[in-house]
Image (cartoon, grey):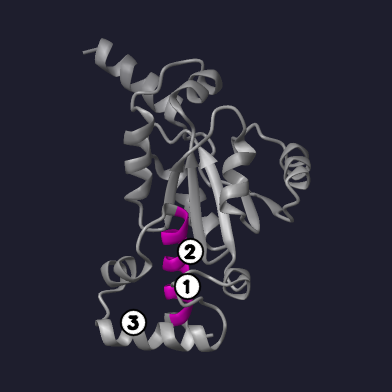
Amino acid sequence: MEQSEKTILSIMYVAQIQEKNAFEEIKKKTLLEENIIKSNIENLIKKQFVNEDNTLTESGRNSLIVVLAGGVFDIIHPGHIHTLNAAKELGDVLVVVVATDNTAMKMKKRRPLHVQEQRQELVNSLSMVDLCLIGQEDDIFKTVNHVKPQIIALGYDQVHQEKFITEGCKKIELDAKVARLQSPIPESSSSKIQKEYGESIHGI
């Protein structure tokens, strides 16, 4: 498969998740001329990767490796960038889930500096991220089932254990691999940055 076709399939997949117009999203994200986009889509329909309504067929979806990563992402720091870059390298599409404000409070024992919509916007602005969603409070596997990733990437500092994720995926009949990512700067964290910033302000 050509890279241009893979790119179009990736954009179509993200458009489906967001319930957006796939053709308009391809125009916006690739800057290709309409006739070239239409020609590519026609080829993908002939190959049975795409349906007539510009949604992915099962073969089209299976041709993409979707990676799912999650976290609070309250203060974007170099550790996040490295981890998300490493996650993107594992597949074709990177979907990131940011924790809700309530979940973030439970995890961090403090209120996040940015509300969930702001954190979603920040993560969506990162070049390696194809789509950022706000998570579900009651059941993280609702989002996992919605995205249906082939790989779930866990950050170096995340408490979720591989066994918990693997067993949860089995319950929703999803065959996904779990990848534990490492960071070259494990001492970097949003909580530490906030604490050190607060101390420096008080010290002025």
Residue 50: tell me if it is visible.
Answer: yes
Q: Spatial distance from mark 1 to mark 2, Cα to Cα?
A: 6 Å
Task: Name the spot of residue 143 as percent of width and height, x first.
Answer: 57, 43
Query: Which residue range is magenta in the image?
Result: 5-17
Sequence-wise, the earlier of marks 3 and 2 is 2
| Residues packed near mark 1 inside 10 Å, few (<14), some (14 to 19) or many (20 plus) | many
Front residue of this view, candidates 153 and 120: 120
Task: Name the spot of residue 61 as percent of width and height, x first.
Answer: 58, 68
- The disc placed on residue 9 is 1
- The disc placed on residue 20 is none
Q: In the rendered view, does 87 fall on the left or right side of 24? A: right
Check disc 2 and give the amino acid type.
Tyr
Q: Are marks 3 and 2 in contact (CB under 8 Å)?
A: no
Check disc 1 and give the amino acid type.
Leu
Q: Residue at x 41, y 58 (%)?
A: 128
Find disc 2 in the rendering and name its residue. 13
